[in-house]
Image (spheres, helix red, strand yellow):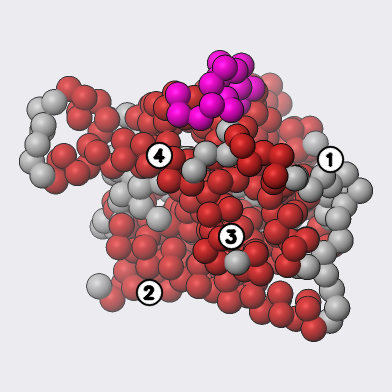
Amino acid sequence: MIGLLGLLAGLGLLIWLALRDVNIVFASVLCSLVVIATNALPLADSLSNSYAFGDLGAFTFAGRFFLLFAAGAIFGRLMGDSHAATSIAMALVRRLGAHRALWITVLSCALLTYGGVVVFVVIFAMYPLGLRLLKEADIPKRLFCGAAALGAGTFTLTALPGTPSIHNVIPTLKLGTDLFAGAGLGLFGGAVMLALGMFYLERERVKARAAGEGFVAGPNDVIPDLDAIQKDMPHWALALIPMIVVIGTILAPRLLELAGIGGSSAILQFANSQPVIWPSMALILASVIAVALFPAIRKGGLRLMGNGTQDAIMPLIATSAVIGFGGVVAQTSGFATFTSAVLGADLPPLLSVFTAASAVSGITGSSSGGLQIFMATLADPYLAKGIDPEELHRIVAMASGGFDSLPHCGAVIAMLTITQLTHKQAYKDVGVVTVIVPVVATLLTVGLAMIT
């Protein structure tokens, strides 16, 4: 009983510290010590193995996925500094109108994340342009957080097939699937997320206008002068080429395989056997092409790539630290009791998968952390129940993207820090589009999978 209370206390403390902007790495270590002490786990082994270097350890995760994080951050830095991301967004402005700022933010973030840019970098890249759009349309800044979270942190990360996101890669390592697993289910779930999320955001925009709530800049906000960067901004069609290269490179092996071409090719075999390296190579190839295409970054391309690598460090360490906390939690008797209860519950298998993945992601405050723990501890029992690996891949990925976005989520904290808003000001909108909407969409997808 004390161990279970300690587990809950550690989780509660992690959320409390996150809400108070305490460094997530420090918070994860402190909360891990609480769990270790209350569950009488061996101190040295728990810190060096369970937290740091074990199968679910922080540094094991960081080492396994460093290249993917770095490649995504490099690509994002180049797309931002070349003004290619701004060009794509402004093309949407010209076609949709600045008054549709929320739609433009969602679609721009979605294009960038589906093209391989990591979430943290997308927020950095989109925020300056978002400020200008919000000011012109007189929309509260809190709704930018909701729109960016919907576009960058929901359907493009967990639902849409083919995305090179870490959330779509992790299941492939355990299940032997590819990035397009459960494509039909993913497209359905992604469409539901987008529809429900935009319905909520547009409703909130109308309510805010009726209440007289408009745009208020933060003390450190700098609204960019588009005229000043116009000469360096590539045409939107040219700006799309690196993103097309990313998706095309990832998609090529599957298309060739379906066409019966190059089945014995060493390159094709390599691509199918390297779910982390291949999308990383796609991002690096697209980065090189971006440097060649865009004059604004051509001279300083290597320096910007180095800066992009630096951009990846803190998101990777923050994510890894939360996973380390989850690695400690996974060693407790309370977690063993939870997994036994979920596996033994009288639920349809896919609904049980949703419950387990959602709970683990909620505990860790990280969809990638929840996925990692689920795949290491629960994937085999569910496969033994006869669940199709492709269905398991897609449902688990989508389920991990719901309760992960509770207030202690590192991505949520980073977004609020960047936008200079507090949980009290903006978390309601973020919570609706990143918790409630994905949960509803995943449950509907589970229902679809069960009747087809």
Main SS category, magenta section = helix
Residue 334 % position (x, y)? 62, 50
Camera-side mark, 4 or 2: 4
The type of residue carrying mark 4 is Ile
Q: Report the residue marked by disc 4.
A: 241
Q: Report the residue marked by disc 3.
A: 93
Secondary structure of the residue carrying numbered label 1: loop
Q: Report the residue marked by disc 2.
A: 447
Give the number of the disc on residue 119: none
The type of residue carrying mark 3 is Val
CB under 8 Å between discs 1 and 3: no
Q: Identify which residue is drawn at 81% across, 58% down.
A: 423
Magenta stretch contains residue 294: yes
With respect to residue 250, does 378 lie above or below? Answer: below
Camera-side mark, 4 or 1: 4
Magenta range is 292-308
Q: CA distance from mark 2 to mark 1?
A: 39 Å
With respect to residue 301, does 272 lie above or below? Answer: below
With respect to residue 117, does 98 lie above or below? Answer: below
On the question of residue 97 being in view, the answer is: yes
Secondary structure of the residue carrying numbered label 4: helix
Magenta stretch contains residue 70: no
Q: CA distance from mark 1 to mark 3?
A: 38 Å
Q: CA distance from mark 4 to mark 1?
A: 40 Å
> Is disc 2 surrounded by few (<14), some (14 to 19) or many (20+) residues within 10 Å?
few
Quadrant occupied by the C terminus: bottom left
Q: Which numbered disc flags the more N-terminal residue, 4 or 2?
A: 4
> Is disc 4 surrounded by few (<14), some (14 to 19) or many (20+) residues within 10 Å?
some
On the question of residue 33 being in view, the answer is: no
The type of residue carrying mark 2 is Gly
Q: Report the residue marked by disc 1.
A: 22
Q: CA distance from mark 4 to mark 3?
A: 19 Å
